[in-house]
Amino acid sequence: MLSGYFKSNFGNKNFKASTQWHASYFQIHSPSEHLIDGNRYDLELHTVHVAPRGVVKNKIEGAFLSIIFDTNEKYKYVPDETI
């Protein structure tokens, strides 16, 4: 379980949602769950955030953040013998 929280005005400004979010859990998908320009990538990490009780606004209770990982040769900095 992740711990901590962050505050952001993005959800409030764009969706009239909460400004405070708790990191709840994460998910890892391999290959990536989502496509970018029709391309699927090696790994996708989702962090899932929920609004604390009592501060849910506009019925928006959660938010996801996805990070896409690519091991394309163009960006590889690790020598092949260590992989």
Image (spheres, grey):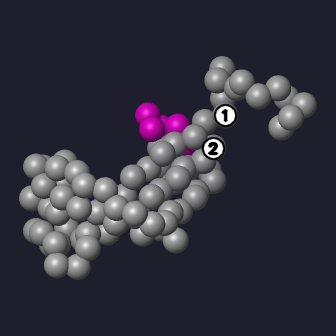
Could you tell me residue 44's position as x and y percent? 54, 50
- Kindly give the residue lying farthest to the bottom in the view shown: 53
Q: Is 51 left or right of 71, judged from the image as shown?
A: left
Nearer to me, 12 or 74: 12
Q: Residues within 10 Å of mark 1 (few under 14, many from 20)?
A: few
Numbered marks: total: 2
Label 2 close to label 1 by CB (< 8 Å): yes
On whether residue 4 falls in the magenta region, the answer is no
Whole-angstrom CA distance, mark 2 to mark 1, is 7 Å
Tell me which corner region of the image, top left, top right, bottom left or bottom right, holds residue 71: top right
Residue denoted by label 2: 42
Helix, strand or loop at mark 2: loop
The disc labelled 2 sits on which kind of residue?
Asp
Residue at the image position 12 percent from the left and 69 percent from the top: 57
The disc labelled 1 sits on which kind of residue?
Thr
Q: Is 63 left or right of 71, judged from the image as shown?
A: left
Could you tell me residue 67's position as x and y percent? 48, 45
Could you tell me residue 16's position as x and y percent? 9, 59
- Kindly give the residue lying farthest to the right in the view shown: 81
Could you tell me residue 49's position as x and y percent? 36, 64
- Residue 40 - label: none
Magenta extent: 36-41
Residue at the image position 66 percent from the left and 20 percent from the top: 74
From what the image shows, is residue 81 above or below residue 55? above
Residue 77 shows up from this direction? yes
Q: Is 24 left or right of 29, judged from the image as shown?
A: left
Nearer to me, 38 or 59: 59
From what the image shows, is residue 67 above or below residue 55? above
Q: Is 32 left or right of 60, judged from the image as shown?
A: right
Residue 49 shows up from this direction? no
- Residue 71 - label: 1
Q: Residues within 10 Å of mark 2 (few under 14, many from 20)?
A: some
